Image (spheres, rainbow, N blue to C red):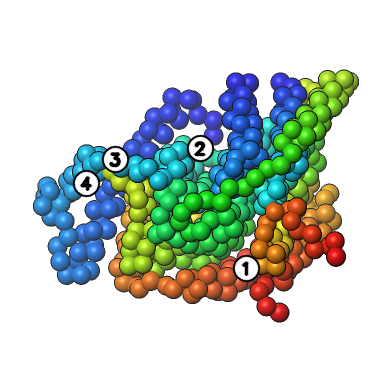
Amino acid sequence: MAQPIFQTLWKTGVVFLGALTAAAYLVLAERKFAGYFQERYGPNRVGPFGLLQPLADAVKLLLKEEVIFPQASRGLYLAAPVIIGVAALLPLAVIPFSEHFYIADLPVAVLYLLAVGSLSTYGVLLGGWSSNSKYALLGGLRSAAQMVSYEIAMALALVGVALMAQSLSLVKIVQAQQSLWFLIPQILGFVVFLIAAFAETNRLPFDLPEAESELVAGYHTEYSAFKFAMFFVGEYIHLFIVGCLVTVLYLGGWYGPWKPGPHWFFLKTFLVLFFMIWVRWTYPRFRFDQLMRFSWKVLIPVALLNLLLTSLWMAL
Amino acid sequence: MTVTPYIGLGFVLFSIGLFGVLTRRNTVGILMAIELMLNASNIVLVAFSRMHGNLGGQLFAFFTITVTVAEVAVGLAIVIQVFRLKKTIHADEITLLKG
Amino acid sequence: MWIFWLIAIPLVLFALGVVLSKNLFRSTIYLGATLVLTALIYLLLHAELLGFIQILLYTGGVATLLVFAIMLTQRIVGEDITQQSRGLVGGAIASLAVLLILFFFLGSSQLDFSVRPYPENLNLALGKNLFVTYVLPFEVLSVLLLAAIIGAIVMARRDR
């Protein structure tokens, strides 16, 4: 577990750069798949098959004008994208990409994930409030209510996994799935976790905090250029991490037939992400009261039932 | 390593919270200052737990956090109800019990 | 030790912000920062589990407080309603006196403040303590939480 400091440093560098690249190409993947789902091509002008599009996007965002309008609360307005970016990157520290490649193997990793995951709520609320705009504020308020409610369901689903693995460490959780993925014994928890993950990443069908047709762009309406890029990249890093987490917690991480290794990990993560993109371009948006009712009256009871069954199973 | 600075930090935070409770007029502000005081007492509890190598202090802090969460929930519910009734959240204007 | 000061000084500054800020929303944000920094202090004291629980529980709590702060003090967009304080001088004198008394006791105590080691497997020991030694308070707490939830719902309901 204890590694030399320089090893931790280069691993951190590789993981963070990797995640940023992954986020950039997730944007491209989303646009491409969206295109195919709607029978058009998607971006295909920059580079072969549009493969250089993320670079072009990044340059465009960096070269745009920075707008800080005088009505905003300057300090908090600038802090919000920073909080979003940091909170998006922090979970990467405990994700095991393969048997030996992880930055840290925390004994309380599951709790750590939930704790840093909840920090992004602050960024969203701050951004929404300090913009001094009604669309942004409404988006921020919606997101606070939504994230707090769905986090409970997510945490309850995670307790089931921790009970099965008898550990809170993600490495041990993956090792416990060597013979049987948790997808099968934890199928209820898996469904709850996946649905809650859609809500936590603010994606359709739960994208009320940034519903274009009602709120322009929700909490980041008033952000431009690099600050907007932080929100945007943060969102896609969050998506990438959710893909990794589903793989680690339910799909057996790096295990697979023939030869276990990181290639299995990334294949599974890609499939999960493809599924999430697919859902986004298929389903319409929930209404806000439906959203809250669904969390409190369906997801949380199902998660509790899953927890009860799991504890009974483990006690026998 | 000694735990003295941690305990001192807890004392400073406690006094700041006390100041808030004494000076705020806003009920939500008072609730937040109480949070601050409970938080300070938690730091001292954990510091003493470290000093004795005994986990009781940590567990007590854990219990305190839970009680605080319950307190905030009930406190905010009372604030809402009072706000509906009196249209104010200033503690010194809430004089319902004076008849 | 310098890590402690790196956390403690902003912590005290944010705490001052909580009680001094004129704007309720800002003081709630400062409260959030205070609670997160306190969690870091717990990490320094080898209370990892407690630190993460602190962040997890309080972010939800503070987020709710924030929403309240907005609802009660702001007309959706426009000027904020400032919150006043009263008796600043008296409050300052009283709390400084308490601080001095506390530090007097700290200075005059005969205790040995050096650190003693924790048990080997900390999380296991914590779990054993929680669910064996202190299982009664734990259960009582769960009843308390249930009562608090019901009480909050009953009181916040509009009509009955």
| Foreground pick, A234 / C99 | C99
**Chain of the residue under the numbered disc 4 shown in the image:** A
Indicate which disc, 3 or 4, sits on the residue closer to the N terminus.
Answer: 4
Report how far apart the C-alphas of labels 3 and 1 lie in the structure. 47 Å
Indicate which disc, 1 or 2, sits on the residue closer to the N terminus.
Answer: 2
Q: Are marks 3 and 4 in contact (CB under 8 Å)?
A: no
Callout 3 amino acid: Glu
Indicate which disc, 4 or 2, sits on the residue closer to the N terminus.
Answer: 4
Marks 3 & 2 on one chain: yes
Between marks 1 and 4 in the image, the one whose residue lies nearer the viewer:
4
Residue sitting at x 22%, y 46%: A57
Marks 1 & 2 on one chain: yes
- In the image, A222: left or right of A4? left
| Figure check: A5 above or below B87 | above
Between marks 4 and 2 in the image, the one whose residue lies nearer the viewer:
4
Callout 4 amino acid: Asp
Marks 4 & 2 on one chain: yes
Indicate which disc, 3 or 2, sits on the residue closer to the N terminus.
Answer: 3
| Figure check: B60 above or below B50 | below
Indicate which disc, 3 or 1, sits on the residue closer to the N terminus.
Answer: 3
**Which percent across, then down, holds residue A163?**
62, 57
Residue under label 4: A57
Report how far apart the C-alphas of labels 1 and 2 lie in the structure. 30 Å
Residue sitting at x 72%, y 24%: B5
Residue under label 1: A304
Per the rendering, the mark at residue A66 is: 3
Report how far apart the C-alphas of labels 3 and 4 lie in the structure. 16 Å
